[in-house]
């Protein structure tokens, strides 16, 4: 039988986190805008809480965080609400660290999440303290989210972190937060097994059994309390029972161990401690499993009992500290660190300290490392004796060992070479995948500027991009400051020829050997070619790589020339990918660009106006639209011909483009009409720009085929939101009406 699929998935993700480094998931904390309301909402005949249908701001009170509102007075129902911040999320979810104890989440009159079971009175039983992932609708930021909470526990409300993030980012966030605890838990299990083995082998040393019990309890507690346990098996109540049992067992193991160390002094008080805690463990879990009490209600009494027990054991240990051995003192200090972290975690859980992640796992790790160090000390002493006995045997087998090591090094060299090539292949796959998500060639080169050092390592190199008729360096790696290549590549004599790898000859073992002079002391040049739809093949980039002479010594096993060949193939694949991006970019430009004037076309204007209208409404910022029409253009066209008319349109278009801000967008609306979208511009700003436009157009003569055809004028109409009082989508029609008035009142004028 194999591992369950969920286990294999978790192991794979943990491996990825360890190999690739800590994954930092982007999250947006929800720490502001919370309100609360004591009591429970009545429901209408459709089962919808009435409190979610009416705003009633006078009934809601502000609160910094939705947990333990003031003036509880024994109440067990409370509602919270918040309007979540807007952001660009692909699969948005609301992450909540924990809830005391059951909850419903309502949005827009419908329940989108529930944890626990509410009866007709709105009450329910404790069902565990898991973390929560609440899928959010697409319009989650437009209306408030309501949280119905019931708790008969000492705390009520949400607890810990509350944040908006992507689903994939949440999984990585959970695993990243749990990774340390899981590693420490595994290490503690190993310590427990070793201690148990010593307890079996040395039956007279009972402290080993207590040590195994403590290490196993701490490991189970860390595993059960880690958030990743839900990914392993989604059974929150099971994990809480396991966490409670292991947590309640810790003082039993600690007292047993201390009592065994102080057995010569008859520590009756320490023996009483472990007996009381063992009785509490059995009674609390039995009553909770029988349904007589909730498991959650067993924690506060135990925490109080644990605090008293820790103080008692600390006083006894301090009094008898001198009578302990050095090993026992080290372990007692480790117990002290672990106990201090438990007390801090207890204070956070009961609200004495502000919420934070208490590194209880570090206490367990410190204890485990102490055990390891003590074991290593014993091991070192034993090893010293073994070395003295094995000296003669090692001398006899040294020659054979040398031969085997030489063979192993050769095999390891081949294995490293294969692993190296595989790693470069994965890097290339990642680069191609990231390039496929780019929307422009420039964006693709930005990706290459970041990725090329990793792809070309351990070679020195530089990447140049074709810009403004030249080649500009966008990335450089492996060089000292004084040896870096220039920022601009000198191409006055033409582009450098692309380099081809040299041919190799096989050695005695069948591996290819390459002449060192063919690899060192020179730079290799690789062309990055793009295929364009309009003008064919273009060398859009140049990659230069240089080999360090030490890299290709006789003992080197990097396979440098094979790396160059792989780079050549990689550059070709990257060129094909960028060619596809270039084609998409050209197609998009054709669909949004007016062929005659080079301005944006009507289709682009319609989409942009809809977008800017929504932005203006959301930010309550002004938005102006200007329509300009060339006066008497039909008469001009009839008098001088369509070619002259086209020249006039291009001239007016250039004048328009030069009269507005970078944030303004000028489009050709059709015929001799042009439109300008001006985000953030008031009516006065728009009128000022329009007046300047009229003057600029009337001052420029129309020159066609070497002769002057006179001057043209334009009329303009302006509409501004919110001055118009209507939706921003009505701005075009209102600006058109203003343009009509300008035409009626004599042309070459602006109307608002």
Image (cartoon, helix red, strand yellow):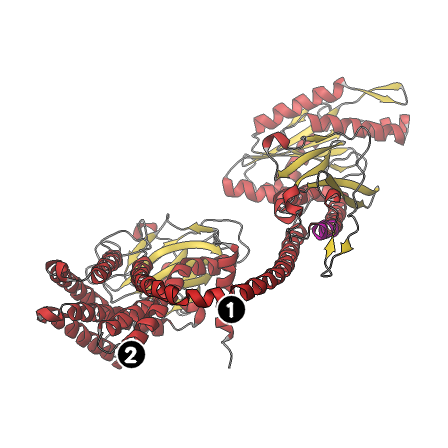
| Residue at x-position 57% and y-position 65% | 404
Left or right position of 614 against 495: left
Crowd around label 2: few <14 · some 14–19 · many ≥20 (10 Å): some
Tag 1's secondary structure? helix
Left or right position of 55 against 170: left
Tag 2's secondary structure? helix
Crowd around label 1: few <14 · some 14–19 · many ≥20 (10 Å): some
Examine the image and state in which quarter residue 616 appears.
top right
Q: Which tag, 1 or 2, sits closer to the chain's start?
A: 1
Q: Position of residue 21 (x, y in %)?
A: 49, 54
| Residue at x-position 55% and y-position 64% | 399
Left or right position of 529 against 405: right
| Residue at x-position 19% and y-position 75% | 278
Q: Position of residue 125 (x, y in %)?
A: 30, 73
**In this view of the protein, which residue sits in the foreground, 471 or 395?**
395
Assess whether mark 2 and mark 1 are in contact (beta carbons under 8 angstroms).
no
**In this view of the protein, which residue sits in the foreground, 101 or 14?**
14
Please report the bounds of the magenta region as a residue range: 561-570
Judge whether residue 53 can be spotted in this image. Answer: no
Q: Position of residue 324 (x, y in %)?
A: 16, 62
Examine the image and state in which quarter residue 611 appears.
top right
**Circle 2 residue:** 200
**Circle 1 residue:** 9
Left or right position of 650 against 228: right
Specify the quadrant that holds the C terminus. Answer: top right
Judge whether residue 218 can be spotted in this image. Answer: yes
């Amino acid at each position: 039988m194999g591992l369950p699929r969920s286990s294999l998935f978790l192991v794979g993700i943990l491996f990825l986190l360890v190999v690739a480094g800590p994954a930092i998931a982007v999250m947006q904390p929800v720490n502001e805008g919370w309100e609360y309301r004591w009591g429970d909402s009545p429901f209408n005949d459709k089962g919808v809480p009435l409190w979610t249908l009416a705003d009633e701001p006078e009934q809601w009170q502000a609160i910094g965080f939705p947990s333990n509102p003031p003036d509880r007075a024994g109440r067990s129902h409370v509602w919270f609400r918040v309007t979540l911040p807007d952001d660009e999320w692909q699969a948005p979810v609301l992450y909540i660290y924990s809830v005391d104890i059951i909850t419903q989440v309502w949005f827009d009159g419908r329940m989108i999440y529930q944890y626990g079971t509410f009866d007709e009175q709105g009450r329910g039983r404790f069902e565990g303290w898991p973390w929560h992932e609440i899928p959010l609708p697409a319009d989650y930021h437009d209306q408030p989210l309501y949280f119905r909470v019931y708790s008969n526990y000492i705390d009520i409300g949400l607890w810990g972190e509350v944040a908006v993030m992507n689903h994939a980012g949440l999984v990585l966030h959970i695993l990243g937060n749990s990774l340390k605890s899981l590693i420490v838990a595994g290490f503690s299990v190993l310590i427990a097994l070793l201690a148990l083995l010593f307890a079996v082998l040395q039956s007279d040393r009972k402290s080993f059994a207590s040590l195994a019990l403590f290490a196993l309890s701490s490991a189970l507690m860390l595993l059960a309390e880690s958030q990743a346990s839900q990914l392993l098996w989604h059974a929150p109540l099971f994990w809480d029972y396991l966490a409670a049992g292991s947590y309640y067992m810790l003082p039993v193991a600690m007292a047993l161990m201390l009592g065994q160390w102080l057995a010569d002094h008859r520590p009756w008080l320490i023996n009483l401690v472990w007996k009381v805690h063992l009785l509490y463990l059995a009674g609390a879990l039995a009553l909770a499993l029988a349904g007589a009490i909730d498991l959650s209600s067993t924690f506060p009494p135990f925490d109080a009992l644990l605090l008293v027990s820790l103080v008692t054991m600390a006083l006894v240990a301090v009094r008898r500290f001198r009578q302990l051995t050095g090993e026992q003192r080290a372990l007692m200090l480790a117990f002290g660190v672990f106990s201090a972290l438990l007390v801090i975690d207890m204070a956070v859980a009961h609200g004495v300290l502000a919420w934070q992640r208490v590194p209880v796992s570090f206490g367990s790790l410190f204890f485990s490392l102490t055990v390891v160090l003590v074991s290593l000390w014993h091991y070192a002493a034993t090893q010293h004796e073994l070395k003295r006995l094995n000296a003669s045997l090692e001398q006899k087998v040294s020659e054979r060992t040398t031969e085997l090591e030489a063979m192993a090094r050769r095999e390891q060299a081949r294995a490293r070479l294969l692993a190296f090539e595989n790693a470069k292949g994965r890097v290339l796959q990642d680069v191609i995948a990231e390039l496929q998500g780019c929307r422009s060639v420039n964006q693709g080169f930005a990706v290459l500027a970041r990725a090329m050092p990793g792809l070309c390592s351990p070679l020195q190199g530089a990447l140049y991009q074709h810009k403004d008729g030249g080649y500009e360096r966008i990335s450089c790696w492996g060089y000292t400051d004084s040896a870096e290549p220039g920022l601009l590549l000198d191409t006055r004599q033409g582009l450098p020829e692309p380099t081809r790898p040299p041919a190799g000859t096989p050695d005695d073992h069948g591996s290819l050997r390459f002449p060192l002079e063919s690899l060192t002391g020179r730079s290799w040049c690789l062309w990055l070619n793009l295929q364009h739809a309009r003008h064919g093949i273009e060398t859009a980039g140049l990659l230069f790589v240089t080999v360090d002479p030490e890299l290709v010594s006789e003992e080197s096993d990097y396979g440098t020339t094979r790396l160059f060949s792989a780079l050549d193939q990689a550059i070709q694949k990257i060129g094909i990918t960028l060619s596809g991006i270039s084609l998409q970019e050209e197609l998009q430009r054709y669909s949004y660009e007016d062929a005659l004037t080079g301005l944006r076309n009507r289709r682009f204007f319609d989409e942009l106006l809809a977008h800017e209208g929504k932005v203006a409404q959301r930010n309550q910022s002004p938005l102006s639209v200007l329509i300009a029409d060339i006066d008497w253009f039909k008469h001009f066209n009839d008098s001088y011909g369509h070619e002259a008319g086209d020249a006039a349109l291009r001239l007016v278009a250039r004048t328009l483009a030069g009269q507005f801000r970078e944030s303004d967008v000028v489009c050709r609306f059709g015929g001799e009409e042009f439109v300008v979208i001006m985000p953030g511009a008031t009516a006065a700003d728009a009128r000022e720009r329009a007046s300047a436009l009229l003057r600029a157009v009337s001052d420029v003569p129309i020159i066609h085929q070497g002769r002057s055809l006179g001057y043209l004028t334009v009329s303009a109409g302006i509409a501004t939101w919110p001055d118009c009082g209507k939706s921003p989508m009505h701005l075009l029609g209102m600006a058109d009406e203003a343009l009509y008035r300008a035409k009626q009142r004599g042309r070459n004028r602006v109307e608002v």
